[in-house]
Image (cartoon, rainbow, N blue to C red):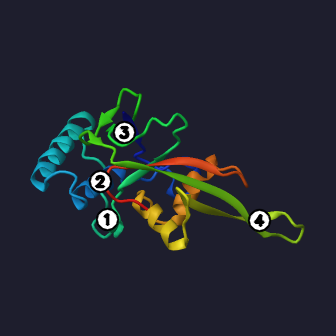
Amino acid sequence: MILPFKTNWPAHMGDMASQPTYFIQKIWEGFFFHEILPTDDLEVLQLKFIKDHRSKFGQSWDLIPDDSSRLKYPKIHTIREDGNGRWKSGVNIDYFINSRTKNMFRFAPNIPCVSTQQLYMLKEPMGLDENDNVNEWGVFFKIDDRVLDYNEAEELALNDGFDSLEAFCQYFDPILEPTKQKSLTLIHWTKFRY
């Protein structure tokens, strides 16, 4: 099943807007780190996909600058709305960018979904101004039946390809309604679970 990924951050991301997400490289790093396939096979496949990308777009995909520490946390899962429950263990993941456009591109081999978990996000008021208006919001996270503490929420954000918990919350903010729990599906392609 097609699983599309952004190559640039959307407009609502403030200073990060239009900057590269580096999701392709972070996903590949996760493949290597978690030994999705034997390393030799992964290296051959990665070179094939890089070559295909260069052929289609005239350049390699965005690479993380050498001085970046982001590869400490490769992207090892993704989060999607899945109201119909389509994502399940064993469903093949088709990794694409530019989905449903003429520039649609598969950047990785089909890898089966290993597992899913339910992620719940809740946006709650955290502060009031002098007129008792909410001036600060916080986001709380629960995976399956367990509430995450700050460190676990930060780990979730980093493992999902974000540089910080703040950026993660900013990304999902448009789909969060204040005081209403949002149910999402965490799609794992490694054995890692929370």
Answer with mark 2 or mark 4, whichever residue precedes in sequence. Answer: 2
Say above or below: 51 vs 119.
above
Answer with mark 1 or mark 4, whichever residue precedes in sequence. Answer: 1
For residue 25, which numbered disc appears in the image? 2
Q: CA distance from mark 1 to mark 2?
A: 9 Å
Mark 2 and mark 1 in contact (Cβ < 8 Å)?
A: yes
Under circle 1, the secondary element is: helix
Answer with mark 4 or mark 3, whichever residue precedes in sequence. Answer: 3
Q: CA distance from mark 1 to mark 3?
A: 20 Å
Q: Report the residue marked by disc 3.
A: 97
- Horizontal and vertical percent for residue 20? 40, 52
Mark 3 is surrounded, within 10 Å at the Cα level, by few (under 14), some (14 to 19) or many (20 or more) other residues, namely some
Q: CA distance from mark 4 to mark 3?
A: 36 Å
Disc 1 marks which amino acid? Leu
- Horizontal and vertical percent for residue 37? 17, 51
Mark 3 and mark 4 in contact (Cβ < 8 Å)?
A: no
Q: Report the residue marked by disc 1.
A: 71
- Name the side, left or right, on which 79 lies relative to 44: right
Q: Residue at x 24, y 61 (%)?
A: 33
Mark 3 and mark 1 in contact (Cβ < 8 Å)?
A: no
Mark 3 and mark 2 in contact (Cβ < 8 Å)?
A: no
For residue 142, which numbered disc appears in the image? none
The image quarter containing residue 90 is top left
- Name the side, left or right, on which 89 lies relative to 10: left
The quarter of the picture where the N terminus appears is: top left
Whether residue 32 is visible here, answered yes or no, is yes
Disc 4 marks which amino acid? Asn
Disc 3 marks which amino acid? Ile
For residue 135, which numbered disc appears in the image? 4
Q: Nearer the viewer, residue 42 or 12?
A: 42
Q: CA distance from mark 2 to mark 4?
A: 37 Å
Answer with mark 2 or mark 3, whichever residue precedes in sequence. Answer: 2
